[in-house]
Amino acid sequence: MTSDESVTEEVEVDVVEEDVQEDVESTDDKPKKQSKSEKRFEQLEREGDIAADYLEGLLDIADLDGDIDMDVEADRAMVAIVGADNLDQLVGDNGKTLDALQELTRLAVTQQTGERSRLMLDVAGYRAGRRELLTEMGQEACRRAKEEGTSVSLSPMTPYERKIVHDAVADAGLKSESEGSEPNRYVVVVP
C-alpha cells in the first residue's frame, strides 16, 4: 500500500462517518423546522439575556449587589433582580423607579433586537407582591359589588395593574371596565 492509498482510505472513512452523523441528526434529509412557538420562546429568552446583561451593567455602575433571574411567562420575558437587601432604591416610591428602569431595559432590548419588547422587570419581589395585593383588591371589590349591588370604583392604576384587577374580577365571574384618562385611569367593578 502506498502512502496515497492510505490517505484515500482515511478520507473515505471520514466521509462515511459524516454521512452516518447526518443520518442520525436528520432522518428525512430536511432540516428540522422550529414551530412558531419555539421561535417565539427563543426570541423571548434572547430578550431576557439582553436585559440581564444591561441590568448587570447598571448594578455594577450603581455598586449594588443582586442576582438576575430570567423566565418566559405569558408571552413575555420576565426578568427579576433578587437576592440583596439594598434593592429598594431601584423600586422607588410606588414602583416609579422600577417602572422607569423597566422602560430603559426595554429600550436596551429594542436597540439590540430591532423589535419592541414587552418584557416585565421585577426588583426584590415588588411586582409579585403588588400582583398579590391587586388580586385581593379585585376580589374585595367583587365582594362589595355583590353585597351592595352597586358599582365599585378603585383608585387609579397603571395599565398593567388594571389588567391584574380585571383578571381577578373575571375569575370571580363579574365584569369590570376601565374609566378615566391616563394617568388617572381606574377600574370599575360592575355587579
Image (cartoon, grey):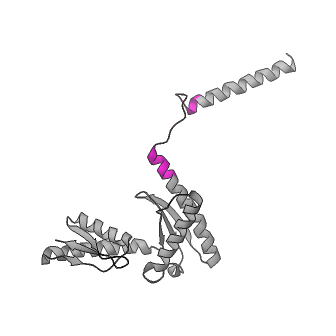
Q: Is residue 17 magenta?
A: no
Give whichever of 114, 18 is nearer the camera.
114
Query: Whole-percent x and y of residue 59?
Result: 60, 74
Query: Whole-percent x and y of residue 134?
Result: 32, 74
Which residue is located at x 44 percent, y 48 percent?
37
Give whichever of 125, 144 is nearer the camera.
144
Quadrant where the image shows the C terminus: bottom left
Q: Is residue 126 left or right of residue 89?
A: left
Report the residue that reaches farthest toward the top: 1
Q: Is residue 186 visible?
A: yes
Q: Is residue 82 visible?
A: no
Report the residue that reaches farthest toward the bottom: 93
Which residue is located at x 54 percent, y 68 percent?
105
Report the residue that reaches farthest toward the right: 2
Displayed quadrant of residue 167: bottom left
Numbered range of the magenta stretch: 23-42
Which residue is located at x 42 percent, y 57 percent?
75
Instruction: Say above or below: 143 vs 73.
Output: below
Q: Count all numbered tags in the image, as a single digit.
A: 0
Instruction: Say above or below: 91 vs 38.
Output: below
Give whichever of 86, 121 is nearer the camera.
121
Query: Whole-percent x and y of residue 126?
Result: 43, 75
Instruction: Say above or below: 44 vs 6.
Output: below
Q: Is residue 62 left or right of residue 40?
A: right
Q: Is residue 37 magenta?
A: yes
Query: Whole-percent x and y of residue 32?
Result: 52, 36
Quadrant where the image shows the N terminus: top right
Give whichever of 183, 50 is nearer the camera.
183
